[in-house]
Structure formats: structure tokens, C-alpha cells
Amino acid sequence: MKFNYLRRIRIISISVFGFALILIGRLYILQVVHSGLYKDKADRQYVSTAKGIFDRGVIFFQNKDGTLVSAATLESGFTVTVNPQVLKEPETVYQKLNEIIPVAHDAFIAKAVKKNDSYEEVAQRVDTETGQKIDALNIPGLKVYKERWRFYPGGSSAAHIIGILGYKGDDFAGRYGLERQFEPMLKRTEGAYTNFFAQIFSDIKSGVSKTSSVEADVVTTIEPTTQSFLEGLLASTTEKWKSDMTGGIIINPKTGEILAMETYPTFDPNNFQKEKSVSIFGNPLVENVYELGSIIKPLTISAGIDTGVITATSTFYDKGYVVVNNKKISDFDEKERGMVSMQDVLSQSLNVGAAHVQSLLGNIRFTDYMYAFGLNEKTGIELPNEARNLVDNLKSSRDIEHATASFGQGIALTPISAVRALSAVANGGMLVEPHIVKKINYKLGFSTDTATNNSRVVLKRETTDEVSRMLTYSVDHVLAGGTLRIPNYSIAAKTGTAQIPNLQSGGYYTDRFLHSFIGYFPSYDPKFFIFLYMVNPHGARYGSETLTAPFMEMVKFLINYYEVAPDR
């Protein structure tokens, strides 16, 4: 009897507990998950609606203290409409309406007299106060309907990352950037059902899925103040040197988290319709490939040191040029320097020196290292249309293909791919996965962090320490004559200048160049890796002339803003 009594108590307790869980779950669904839906329904008791209220997930930036800042959100307002079948005295109505909100007279009258039509929009995105005044006129045939639209609080900030919404036929969806990449998560479909728990466990197992149909918000790695500073720097640098384009990436070389990333000129996603060409919406840092020049030399030197064919003090005779497969390779000034060291190859950016190291490595081993740096694959960054690097010529048996690649000509890379490869030199030899999404916040209240695999080791730690020392020496003693050295901070850097290919007639332009600059600090425990590049600047021949100053401005900003401790 006692056993049955206890059993009944347990059954009743479990039942009560289960019922309570169901009630709590139901309340959570109503008050949290569907709160916006019921708020909209409440609004409709007071303001008419002609169609479903637009809804979409939020894209966030993340401040350095972890607080979230909306980068793509929703703005609320009203649409003003007329029903020509009901509206009387259009001229009188126009006068009353125009006293509240400016409306083009001829356009209003043309819509108001369409007697075979029952719905015409005469104003969109009207603010709440104005919408209420129009509604208070209480004119038959004149109505205001609540509407919401996509709004980007930062204007053009990180526009190439965030993207835009647009129509393709009748389909309104994300067309560029994160808006496109995470469209399945960001879009909202009232009444849609998905097995959330099946999807969430799948996401946890395989990392954040860009094609998940579970409704969610996207939290990026972009730090808004850092992003804003970079954008200002790109704009001023472009204006100074009248370049076709200037771009930059700030990344944590240990984790692959991108703190800032943009190109200039850019656009305002709140008003993108004014742009004359759709080409401005693409992200050149991910979608375009370039011959990046001498910033590739640290990869060649790293491969040479890693295999033991050279050391930092190894020397060779530089006569200013070398002939490979009947093709002449020259240093930038074709000056004969005599015996020089590998340190000179980096500090003075000697093409002949890089080709010498490549010849010691041999074509096969050189190619193996370049591919190990990920140059033969996409990075997988969470942005659409990532281009594939043009490095198939490294499969060639011709020596000239490998010799020119050793100093960054003849192979074309996306900037993000170059940043990934060079981050391995900065971080101790690890090939990171660059990423721009920190986590996904699901509408039901759960979240998943971005899963990355940063376990691929491509260089020995001793190798990267030595190359970092060589690049630091260049900043301390050679770059701008050593005048830019910051006494308490070690900074490693390399400049680059590359000829731009002439795609029409072949060969290279003689008067168009691509300037590049990479650097990281503190040199032996880097918190930041900076990449800058400029396409076709005017008034300067070399990247050291145009990008050294903005690089140092960026370094000083990061030191102060993130309160980086001195390392020497």
C-alpha cells in the first residue's frame, strides 16, 4: 500500500511538473519568440495595414567590451495611400496633405483619379508623428499603413561586409555581403516551422551553418570604432593619392577574427539606388584577385629558412638582375649591390634575392610551401562570391613562373587569402581561418559560436620568430630611415609594389602600380595584423611612399584604443 501511495505521488508530481514546463514554454513562445508578431497585431487595432509587416533578423557589430551595436536593423514608420474609388475632391485632399508632408502635386493627382484602382501609395517611410497627423485628418480614401524597412544605422560603415537587400524579379532578399550569405537565417516567414532542435544540434556539431533555415540574428567580429577609424584612413589616403581604390583589413592573426575590413570608395546601403554601377556593391577584398608584389617575399624567405636552405645571415651576389628562361628579372632599380644578406633581401625588397631563395628551394618544394600557405584554396570566409586565387602556373615546370611568384608577380591572390597566409608568419606558423561572424543568436533564445579550425601548422616556431625579427629590423632601421621606430613597441612590416597587368594587350602597364603594406605587432606575440593596399595611385612609385604613414597611424590608434602594453 505504501509503495502504491508513493508511486501515485511521484506520478502526480511528474505530471504537475510537466504541465508547468509546458505552460512556461508556451509563455516563452508567446512573450519572447512571437512578441513582435503580437505587438504588430496590437498596432493594427489602431493603424491599418495593407500587407504583412516586414520583418528580418538583425546584424550586429561588437564593441571591444562585448556589447552589441546594431549594424543592420529595422526602422518603423508609415506608408500614406489613397483609394481613388472612395476619395472625393482630390485637390482639396492634396492641399490638406501637403500642409503636413511635401507631396508632388501632379503625381498625387495622377494617382488619386485612377477610378479603377483601390490602392495607390503616395508617400513611404513617413515618421510616426507625421503619420499620426495624416491619420487624424480622417479623410475617407486617405489612409496610413504601418510599415517597417531595413535600416543601417552606420550608413556606409562596413557596407561591403553587410551588403544590401534588393529585388530579383519578385524576390526581395539579401543580395550582397552578410545579407546574402545568411539570408536563410535573417529572413522572417510568419507561420514557418522548422525542427529547431534538429537544426541547432546540427549547427553545434558542424559549426555555424550559413544555410540554416532557423530564424536568427548574426553577431559579427567587427569592432565599430576600429572599423570607423580604418574607413576614415582609407578615404583620406584615397583622396591624397587619387587612387582607383584603397582597401584594408585588421585581423587578429592568432584567432582569425576580423576587427575591421573595407574598401574605398564605398556606398550607403540606406540609399544604394543612387549608385550608377552595381560593381560597387561587390567586396574586392574577397571577390577580386591581384598581383600583390613584395609583401609575398616573407613567405618565400620563411620557406627558405624553414627548410634550412638559407638563414637570415646567408649571402649571395646581387648584380641587380638575373636571367631565367631567357627572361630578365630585375631589382626595382637594377643596381648591382654585390654581396648581400637575406636581411637585405627583405629590408631592401630585392626581387633577385627572392628568386635566388626560390631557386635553392626548387620548384616543387617552393610550390608545396605556397600551397601549404593556403594559396591554392579559398579561405572560407563567411562572405559570398569568394574568388579563387590564380596560382595554377605554379604547377608549371618552367622556372620563370616560380621565380616571379617568389616576389609576388605572376600569381594573383585575393587580399583575404594573402592576409591568411601572412598571418602564419606572424602567429608562429599556424594557418588560421579568417572569419567575420562571431556567433549566431537564434530567435528561440539559444546561440552558437563560430567554429574554426586553426590547427594547421605550416611553419616552425623558430622560423617565424626569425622572420619576425628580420621584419622588425626593417622597421627599426630601414623603413623611412628608421625614423618611425616606436621605442617601446616591436613592429614587423613589409612594403610592396607590383606592376598591374594589361589585360587587353598583355604584359604590364609601365605607369600603373599596385601598392601594398603588411605589418603586425607586437612582433613576437601579435595582437593585430594590418593589411593595406592601393590600386593605381598617382604621384608616387612605391608602396613605401604612400602606405607607410597610414600604416603607422593605424598602429598608433590600435595601441591607444586597445591599451596594448609595451613589449620592449
Image (cartoon, rainbow, N blue to C red):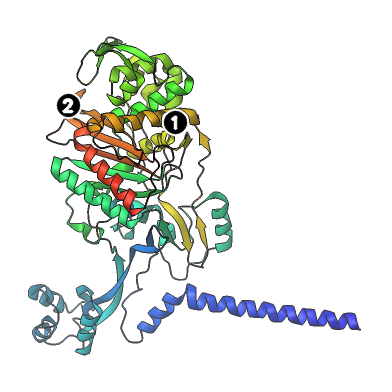
| Circle 1 residue | 464
Q: Is residue 81 above or below residue 527?
A: below
Q: Quadrant of the C terminus?
A: top left
Question: Mark 1: which secondary structure?
Answer: helix
| Residue 10 position in % (x across, y down) | 79, 79
Q: Is residue 474 left or right of residue 192?
A: left
Residue 378 seen in this snapshot: yes
Instruction: Look at 50% across and 41% down and name the residue there.
Output: 454
Q: In the picture, residue 477 is in which quadrant?
A: top left
| Circle 2 residue | 509
Question: Mark 2: which secondary structure?
Answer: strand
Tell me the tag on residue 109.
none
Q: Sequence order check: which comes first, mark 2 or mark 1?
A: 1
* Amino acid residing under circle 2: Tyr
* Amino acid residing under circle 1: Thr
| Residue 273 position in % (x across, y down) | 20, 58
| Residue 274 position in % (x across, y down) | 17, 57
Q: In the picture, residue 317 is in which quadrant?
A: top left
**Near-viewer residue (277 or 470):** 470
Q: Is residue 206 left or right of residue 487?
A: right
Q: Nearer the viewer, mark 2 or mark 1?
A: 1
Q: Distance from label 2 to label 1 (Cα)? A: 35 Å
